[in-house]
Amino acid sequence: MQLLDLDPGITFWTAQQDSDVLGCGALKELQPCEGEIKSMRTAARARGRGVATLLLEHILEEARRCGFDQLFLETGSQEFFAPARRLYHRHGFIDCPPFAGYVLDPHSVFMTRELR
């Protein structure tokens, strides 16, 4: 994992093999005990290799280390995002209402997970 520090409230990581970026993910602090998973992406050539799981597990570990009690995320409702929704459900996320200024949108699915 490589850490890039662009904004004090957001931490961004990349998963790489040599110089090839296979995926990325970010964690944003919403409130002192709450965070949001942002921008999880896996390169098409890396799908099915466990990159998304690696990134998600790393983000969950970092969120706990930062003292977050709860994580949120927004992902797409379209079929293209079905693998992402399955990944999040497998890792204990459940559907929830919009959060942090998001509004109900037929193209979005909102999820949350307790960390403690």
Image (cartoon, grey):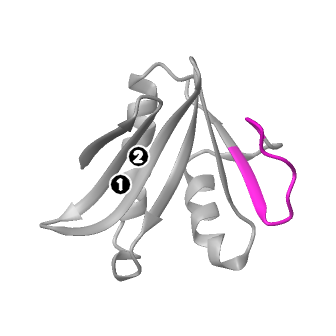
Question: In this figure, which residue is indicated by the disc labeled 1?
Answer: 54
Tell me the kind of residue under disc 2: Glu
Image coords of residue 67 (percent x, y): 47, 19
- Residue at image coords 45%, 38%: 60
Image coords of residue 107 (percent x, y): 79, 66
Mark 1 surroundings within 10 Å by alpha-carbon count, few (fewer than 14), some (14 through 19), many (20 or more): few
Q: Are marks 1 and 2 in contact (CB under 8 Å)?
A: yes
Q: Is residue 37 magenta?
A: no
Residue 35, located in which quarter of the rendered image? top right
Tell me the kind of residue under disc 1: Leu
Question: In this figure, which residue is indicated by the disc labeled 2?
Answer: 57
User: Is the residue 100 above or below the residue 12 in the image?
Assistant: above
User: Is the residue 32 above or below the residue 104 in the image?
Assistant: above
Residue 33, located in which quarter of the rendered image? top right
User: Among all residues in the image, which is located at the extreme bottom?
Assistant: 45
- Residue at image coords 40%, 76%: 47
Relative side of 25 to 109, left or right: left
Residue 5, located in which quarter of the rendered image? top left
Image coords of residue 41 (percent x, y): 46, 64
Out of 58 and 108, give the one closest to the viewer: 108
Image coords of residue 36 (percent x, y): 58, 39
User: Among all residues in the image, which is located at the extreme front?
Assistant: 6
- Helix, strand, or loop for circle 1? helix
Q: Quadrant of the C terminus?
A: top right
- The stretch of residues the image draws in magenta is 99-111
User: Is the residue 49 above or below the residue 44 in the image?
Assistant: above
Out of 34 and 57, give the one closest to the viewer: 34
Q: How many marks?
A: 2
Q: Is residue 103 magenta?
A: yes
- Residue at image coords 40%, 46%: 57
**Main SS class of the magenta portion in the image:** loop
- Helix, strand, or loop for circle 2? helix
